[in-house]
Image (cartoon, rainbow, N blue to C red):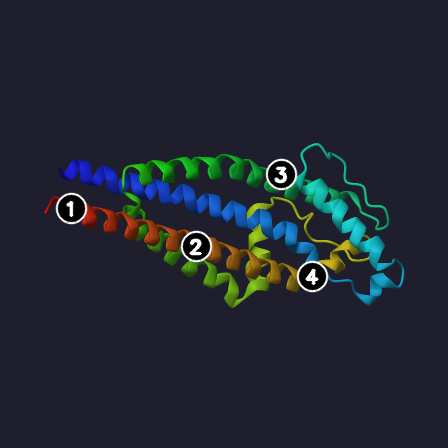
Amino acid sequence: MNGKLINKQWRAYVVVLVCGLAIISTALFITVNLSPLFVDYPHRLLIHWSRGQLAGDYRRLLLYLQVPWVRRLHLAALPLPAGARAHFQAVRHLLLLNEAVLMVALPLAWRMVGKQKRRGQLWQLIAPLMVLGLVVLMLAWLPLINFPTSFIRLHYLLFTDRNWIFNARTAPIILMMPTAFFGKLFALFLGICLLLGSLFFIWLRWQSGLLKLRLQETDDGRN
């Protein structure tokens, strides 16, 4: 009996972890594609290029970073040295990996949650989801305390080279993406994660309540 209970609890944590991975990868994908709303167009760039030219180059960058068959980064207006191209290529690999994770985790989470629902065991996901949400909040709080320092440490962790250190004179595109820009994106990413997680939690509580109500009605009918 204890073995079956442990297996059910373990399965519930696995389901929640897969759902959490799907939520995180979805939030990252949404954040990247909403990033043009937060791009800065400083006066230093507008002296030489129009806002339309700068926005067009940022869209070309996003296409290169996210679309597998766009294999060359070509900016129409802004110059881009070899080091910056190498860094964007490394970022592209990370974002394409996230898209691959999203394509696997999302349908897998859907299938696993559906199986839990058919078994009438959605309620078992509530406690693990609360634990996961608490862990995410605790980890997310650390970068928010000093985002610029955390942002630099993240680059040292993810990239083995120093190509991420841009020179604004040779790679002026960096002026469109200051540290404050990435801080806003991180806040957006965190907000989307919390929103999706909260909606999932509310849905689980609602479905569990419906199941409990149906079981109660069944018992009343028998009595």
Q: Amino acid at mark 2?
A: Leu
Q: Label 1, on which residue?
A: 221
Q: Label 2, on which residue?
A: 199
| Position of residue 161 in the picture relative to residue 108 (left or right) | right
Q: Residue furthest right?
A: 48
Q: Label 3, on which residue?
A: 93
Q: Amino acid at mark 1?
A: Gly
As displayed, is residue 137 above or below residue 124? Answer: below
Circles 2 and 1: CB atoms closer than 8 Å: no
Q: CA distance from mark 4 to mark 1?
A: 65 Å
Mark 4 or mark 1: which comes first in sequence? 4
Q: Residue furthest left?
A: 223
Circles 4 and 1: CB atoms closer than 8 Å: no
As displayed, is residue 149 above or below residue 165? Answer: below
Identified at 74% across, 59% down, the residue is 176
Identified at 79% across, 54% down, the residue is 55
Q: Which mark is residue 203?
A: none
Confirm whether residue 220 shows in the render: yes
Q: Amino acid at mark 3?
A: His
Q: CA distance from mark 1 to mark 3?
A: 58 Å
Residue 162 spot, x, y in % from top left: 67, 48
Secondary structure at numbered mark 3? helix
Q: Label 4, on which residue?
A: 178
Mark 3 or mark 4: which comes first in sequence? 3
